[in-house]
Amino acid sequence: MSRLTYETRTMEPDRAVVASLITPDMKKEGISPENSLEELIQLADTAGVEVTGQIVQYRDRPDPRFLLGKGKALELKELLQEQEANTAIFDQELSGAQVRNLEQLLDVRIIDRTQLILDIFAQRARTREGIIQVELAQLTYLLPRLSGHGKNLSRLGGGIGTRGPGESKLETDRRHIRRRIGELKRQLHEVTRHRQLHRSRRKETGIVQVALVGYTNAGKSTLLKALTDADVLIENRLFATLDPTSRTMELPGGREVVLTDTVGFIQNLPHDLVAAFRATLEEVNEADLILHVIDASSSMRDEQQKVVDRILHELGAGGKPQLVLYNKMDLCEERQKEMLHGGSVYLKVSALNADDMDRIREAVQESLSAGLRTFRIPAARGDLTPVLYRIGQVVNHRYDETDTIYSIDVSRGEYDKYAYLLAPFATEDQGEPMKH
């Protein structure tokens, strides 16, 4: 076991006051401070922390020493004492110096939004790849802040913000952390290489991939279970599932595709986390179709949709074919239903409605289709038959004196891979329906 693993000791339960600084720049960036603070409280609940109070300050710019102004920081200290809280959670990312100053002033554990999300990921990671990626993100976050987390690391020996890579006498000098980061990157590179091999094999066999993406707690895992009977954790919490899960889904025409549930997105997703999880998130880039799941009942629906679109763009998947699924329609008020829109292709669904699941499968089949194409294959070119079955669904085939004529519902993107082989045999004739 790594020296960077925290000790587990008896500790007092986590009680926290959340704090947020609201600046004019947040409005310019399209961030809703109220929604962000509400989300921070949900994140704290997911991490197992009881939030006992909150404090907000409006300032033109952050205070370099305490983030909040000195007077508001003292007000926060009084509130922490009044609520008997042992943790202060900030909605903004803190520098090492700010953490050190706040610890000295408040005498409680100091956590920022990034560290809180990393803590949740540390709790939820189950696979070797997930554990490596979380530890790498945590150490990358910790390295420039070592001087600010000394007291923080030794205060209670565990709990929120201290899971995963850890402490031992501040035990982690920079050289040791850099060495560990290098080792984790090597391990992650090996895992990534295996993942790429699996991707190549899937492509060679013509397997079609569909990715479920969306804001955390939009209902992706519930949809995965409803569409594929997958045995996955379903919980009404942010980041209830972390490691991606893939299952086979059968389409109405009988063809099978691989449906993958990816980690949920969130606004202000830590850059270190995105970097560490890039190998996993890049599964989205390999998908033939993206199912963008949106919680239609959320008051932050439009804002969440923009966050997911932005992250998809950053990952290089912004131009992928996309089907928008407005989920949780059973929880929507009439006014919310009337305001829904999703570009050119979208469905209003509930993961609890079996008919809606059939509609999704039909829409996926339609979205993956590039239309019906006919190929006249000479008897001497029987080697092309497996390729024809790979590029889509064979709707029918018939024979004349010398050739076999195939009508194929071509999968979007698949034909391009084999066009150089099949283009000479393509015909405008769509053929007649096959008689079985």
Image (cartoon, rainbow, N blue to C red):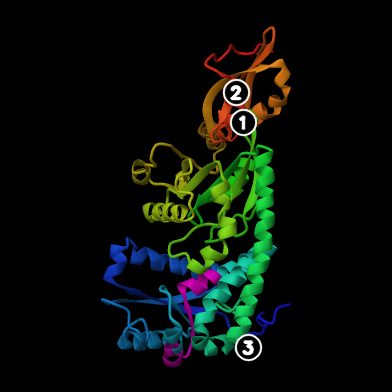
From the top left corner, tell me how far across and down residue 276 is, in percent. Answer: 57, 65
The image's mark for residue 171 is 3
Can you say which quadrant of the picture contains the C terminus?
top right
Note whether residue 230 is visible.
no
Q: Amino acid at mark 2?
A: Ile
Q: Depth check: 202 or 98 in front?
A: 202
Q: Distance from label 1 to label 2 (Cα)? A: 8 Å
Dot 2 corresponds to which residue?
A: 408
Nearest to the observer: residue 209 or residue 336 = 209
Q: Is residue 128 left or right of residue 59?
A: right
Q: Mark 1 falls on what kind of element?
A: loop
The residue drawn where x is 69% and y is 51% is 197
Task: Specify the segment rendered in magenta.
Answer: 101-119
- 102 vs 300: above or below: below
Q: Residue 126: x percent and y percent?
A: 67, 63
**Quarter assignment of residue 170:** bottom right
Residue that label 1 marks = 391
Please give the name of the residue rendered at 48% of the width and 43% of the height, measured from the top-left corner: 320
Left or right of 368 on screen, residue 347: left
Residue found at x 70% / y 21%: 381
The residue carrying pointer 1 sits among few (fewer than 14), some (14 to 19) or many (20 or more) residues within 10 Å by Cα, namely: many
- Magenta span includes 107: yes
Confirm whether the magenta stretch covers residue 3: no
Majority SS type along the magenta span: helix
Using the numbered discs, state the Cα–Cα distance from disc 2 to disc 3 in whole angstroms: 63 Å
Mark 3 neighbour class, 10 Å CA radius: few under 14, some 14 to 19, many 20 or more? some
Position of 146 relative to 303 (above/below): below
Q: Nearer the viewer, residue 306 or 177?
A: 177
